[in-house]
């Protein structure tokens, strides 16, 4: 059997496509041959331009994923445009930083809604579509080091990402028999908007860099290869696993 990492002819929905890791994921999948449905609430023209330069089709859908309301429409538009859905990458996510003793209910709800509730219902909608098509499918949830560790001052983020790793396992157990692979990627400390506050704090920044064995912050392109692997037929017997892409952070 030939091993294939090709995504040629496949259609991938990727949320948070406009920037950071989402852009890296779009470009990696575009390079592997997928049609990209980029879901963003902000201008994603840079991602669109770069994906098209790689020869991919790129379809931009605007949506605010703070609520589950846009999900059905995104799937519908994807099918209208490309005819099938094969891959879902739940990448959009937010973080709020505050001491737990002062943490607000709004910062709890906002983070849990985008990072966990919307992700669950997006997985559910994609799986229904996969089952209707009858050819299986691939779901990749973007987790975090805080799916494994506690962290500090980010209680809703740690809860959402720890919950997401558990949810990834549960969905894999329910849907593996339908040839739907649900897996996660846990990025380490990556140079994106998400970590801007940490990188701007000289003490925290030095502390973090000092314990990354690879001796550098990660870049959006670092998660592209692992994501293409998990989206391709090369990973058909990988179910419910969250792969750390962290420059060795967890190995330390
Ligand atoms: P980022 O640059 O802040 O990107 C977050 C993405 O999510 C943006 O596209 C953002 O859109 C989108 N988003 C947030 N809220 C949204 C909403 N309500 N509706 C639609 N889109 C929304 O950070 P990133 O590092 O690339 O983060 C991507 C994912 O990786 C997140 O799930 C994050 O938790 C995870 N992660 C990041 C790191 C890291 O070190 N950077 C580590 C572990 C995990 P806007 O640009 O419009 O806000």
Image: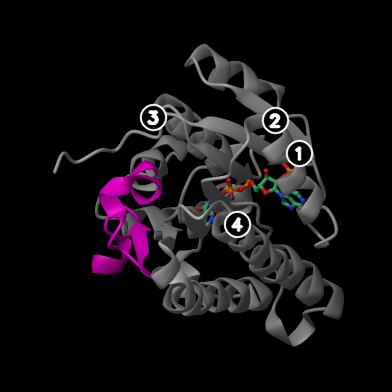
Q: CA distance from mark 3 to mark 4?
A: 25 Å
Q: Residues within 10 Å of mark 4 (few under 14, many from 20)?
A: few
Q: CA distance from mark 2 to mark 4?
A: 17 Å
Using residue 83 as the reference point, say whether residue 140 is left or right of it.
left
Residue 9 shows in the view: yes
Extent of the magenta region: 228-252
What residue occupies the far left of the structure in this picture?
A: 1
Q: Residue at 63% across / 62% down in the picture?
A: 128
Q: Quadrant of residue 59?
A: top right
* Image mark for residue 132: 4
- Decide: is 37 above or below 1: above
* Residue 87 position in % (x across, y down): 51, 47
- Say if mark 1 contacts mark 2, CB within 8 Å: yes
Q: CA distance from mark 4 to mark 1?
A: 16 Å
> For the residue labelled by badge 2, is the local secondary structure a helix, a strand or a loop?
helix
Q: Which residue is mark 2?
A: 81
Q: Quadrant of residue 246?
A: bottom left
Q: Under 8 Å from ligand 1: the CB of mark 3?
A: no
* Image mark for residue 32: 3
The quadrant in which the N terminus is found is: top left
Closer mark to the observer between disc 3 and disc 1 = 1
* Image mark for residue 77: 1
Using residue 160 as the reference point, say whether residue 168 is left or right of it.
left
Q: CA distance from mark 2 to mark 3?
A: 19 Å
* Residue 4 position in % (x across, y down): 25, 38
Q: Is residue 16 magenta?
A: no
Q: Residues within 10 Å of mark 1 (few under 14, many from 20)?
A: some
Q: Quadrant of residue 251?
A: bottom left
Q: CA distance from mark 3 to mark 1?
A: 22 Å
Residue 218 shows in the view: no
* Residue 149 position in % (x across, y down): 44, 77
Q: Residue at 44% across / 76% down in the picture?
A: 169
């Amino acid at each position: 059997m030939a091993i294939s990492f090709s995504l040629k002819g496949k259609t991938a929905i990727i949320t948070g496509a406009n920037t950071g890791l989402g852009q890296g994921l779009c470009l990696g999948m575009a390079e592997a041959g997928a049609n990209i449905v980029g879901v963003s609430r902000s201008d994603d023209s840079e991602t669109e331009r770069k994906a098209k330069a790689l020869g991919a089709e790129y379809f931009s859908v605007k949506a605010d994923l703070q609520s589950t309301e846009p999900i059905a429409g995104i799937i519908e538009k994807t099918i209208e445009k490309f005819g099938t859905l094969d891959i879902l990458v739940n990448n959009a996510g937010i973080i709020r930083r505050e001491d737990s003793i002062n943490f607000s209910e709004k910062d709890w709800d906002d983070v849990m809604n985008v990072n966990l509730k919307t992700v669950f219902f997006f997985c559910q909608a994609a799986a229904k579509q996969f089952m209707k098509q009858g050819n299986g499918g691939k779901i990749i949830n973007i987790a975090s080091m805080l799916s494994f560790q506690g962290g500090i001052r980010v209680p809703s983020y740690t809860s959402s990402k720890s919950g997401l790793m558990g949810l990834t396992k549960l969905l894999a157990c329910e849907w593996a028999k339908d040839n739907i692979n649900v897996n996660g990627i846990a990025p380490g400390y990556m140079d994106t908007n998400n970590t801007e506050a940490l990188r701007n704090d000289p003490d925290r920044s030095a502390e973090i860099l000092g314990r990354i064995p690879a001796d550098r912050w990660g870049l959006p392109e670092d998660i592209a290869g692992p994501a293409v692997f998990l989206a391709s037929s090369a990973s058909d017997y990988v179910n419910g696993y969250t792969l750390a892409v962290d420059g060795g952070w967890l190995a330390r």
